[in-house]
Amino acid sequence: MWFKQIFVYQFNEGFTVTADLIETALEQKPWRPCSQQEASTMGFGSVKKHTESLTYVTGLQVYFKITKQERILPSSVINEALHEKVEEIKNNEQRNVSKKERDEIKENIIFELLPRSFTKKRDYFGFFCLKSGRLVLNCSSATAADDLTALLREVLGSLAITPWQNVLDVKGRLTNWLQETPPSFELLEDFELTSAGDSQSKLKLKHLPLHSKQIEEYIEEGLLISQLRVNYDEKMEFTIKDNVTIARIKYSDELLQKEQADDDDAQFDAECFLHSKEILNLIETIEELFQIEAGI
């Protein structure tokens, strides 16, 4: 349940949801496996084991789980079969194959191969914070986040949210942290520098002291920090990027062991409560540092 990379969205003015409304909405689209001719499926599953509810509520946080299953059909396999079929037509019928016919052949190949393909399944977790008006998703890419919000929008009917984006001068602020590190933050020697011009160049550096003369020279030449790994409050390490994505979160052993319970159910409850508390504290800190408008 401990999120590794978060995408944060704020409710727009006038948008409200309740725990009951979310539960009812998610029931419209329970997850099911791919049929033989489906490339992928997405739907909602139980957050907590041995329960039928599609949400889990702790305080004013409503957790949910989205499961996506995809059929694995590599393009190289499709293209090889397509090439063989096209060559067969050329040799047997002594003619060229038009683009339209190639496309039709390709569709037929995919139709034939899909039922025989392997599948992979992935779970994505998120939660609504009803008090502060936020949606927090745990996923690895903006594309995945778009897929998850599209599914939520489908079942809820509307999802008036705004992502953290177009925050002013993120690179400049991160670069300034070299001179004035915010309270509770420790800068780590894992970062990326980017040129400020239109034709951007990137320089990834590890294990190089942030206050070294070499870094000073890079910054004097106009490079800015576009990605920086930090330790926050000795509770977690993460990488903050210039689009204000919080990635590669690693929680301290002390934090992970803070809530110990007697059984699995109680342990799950304790971890969810602690997790949402720490993630929301981090979000509020980032919003303040980068002057991001909070939710409702």
Image (cartoon, rainbow, N blue to C red):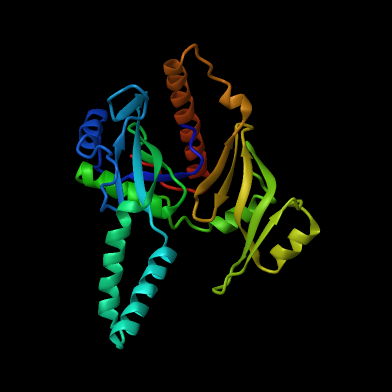
Above or below: residue 129 compared with residue 192: above
Q: Is residue 96 left or right of residue 263?
A: left
Which residue appears at 72% of the width and 64% of the height? 218
Q: Is residue 71 left or right of residue 193?
A: left
Above or below: residue 17 compared with residue 241: above
Residue 234 location (% of width, % of height): 64, 32
Answer yes or no: is residue 159 visible: no
Determine which quarter of the picture holds residue 202: bottom right
Answer yes or no: is residue 56 visible: yes
Which residue appears at 28% of the width and 39% of the height? 31
Residue 267 location (% of width, % of height): 47, 18
Q: Residue furthest top?
A: 262
Residue 90 location (% of width, % of height): 33, 84
Q: Nearer the viewer, residue 24 or 187?
A: 24
Residue 60 location (% of width, % of height): 35, 27
Q: Residue furthest front?
A: 92
Q: Nearer the viewer, residue 38 or 190?
A: 38
Q: Is residue 105 left or right of residue 164?
A: left
Which residue appears at 38% of the width and 45% of the height? 9
Determine which quarter of the picture holds residue 82: bottom left
Above or below: residue 271 compared with residue 110: above
Total numbered circles = 0
Determine which quarter of the picture holds residue 8: top left
The C terminus sits in image quarter: top left
Which residue appears at 24% of the width and 31% of the height? 23
Q: Is residue 156 left or right of residue 245?
A: left
